[in-house]
């Protein structure tokens, strides 16, 4: 899967976000730090949830 990452200067930091993942935003003091931080943010955003599910819930896994 390929996702776009946008890095933009903002005052004294660089803001990085992934448009395909709403709310997946981070920043860094340098552009390189922002790029590193957004990769971690994407990984955390996409990790499986540990949310408790109802016993009768049907759960499916999908690959994208």
Image: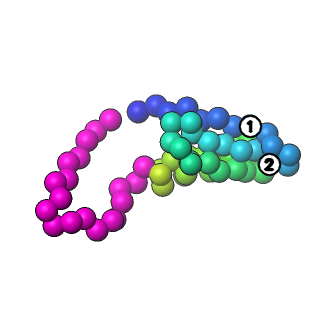
Q: Measured from the top left, where is residue 28 in percent x and y?
A: 73, 50
Residue at coordinates 35% horizontally, 56% vertically from top-left? 48
Residue pushed farthest left? 56
Quadrant assignment, res 53: bottom left
Callout 2: SS? strand
Compared to 31, does 48 lie above or below?
A: below
Q: How many marks?
A: 2
Residue under circle 2? 13
Residue at coordinates 51% horizontally, 47% vertically from top-left? 42
Q: Measured from the top left, where is residue 46 in percent x and y?
A: 42, 49
Compared to 3, does 55 lie above or below?
A: below
Does 55 lie within the magenta span? Answer: yes
Give the mark, 1 or 2, whose residue is nearer the N terminus: 1
Residue under circle 1? 8
Quadrant assignment, res 32: top right
From the viewer's perspective, tell me whether residue 20 is left or right of residue 46.
right
Q: Nearer the viewer, residue 60 or 12?
A: 60
Callout 1: SS? strand
From the viewer's perspective, tell me whether residue 39 is left or right of residue 48.
right
Does residue 3 appear in the picture of this structure? yes
Residue at coordinates 80% horizontally, 48% vertically from top-left? 13
Q: CA distance from mark 1 to mark 2?
A: 9 Å
From the viewer's perspective, tell me whether residue 13 is left or right of residue 27.
right
Circle 2 crowding by C-alpha within 10 Å: few under 14, some 14–19, many from 20: some
Q: In the rendering, which numbered label is found on residue 33?
A: none
Does 6 lie within the magenta span? Answer: no
Does residue 33 appear in the picture of this structure? no
Q: Main secondary structure of the magenta part?
A: loop
In magenta, the rendered stretch is 46-64
């Amino acid at each position: 899967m390929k996702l776009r990452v946008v890095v933009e200067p903002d005052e004294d930091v660089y803001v990085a976000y992934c448009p395909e993942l709403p709310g997946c935003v981070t920043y860094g003091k340098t552009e390189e730090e922002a790029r590193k931080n957004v990769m971690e943010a994407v990984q955390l955003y996409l990790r499986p949830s540990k949310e408790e599910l109802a016993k009768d819930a049907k759960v499916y896994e999908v690959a994208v």
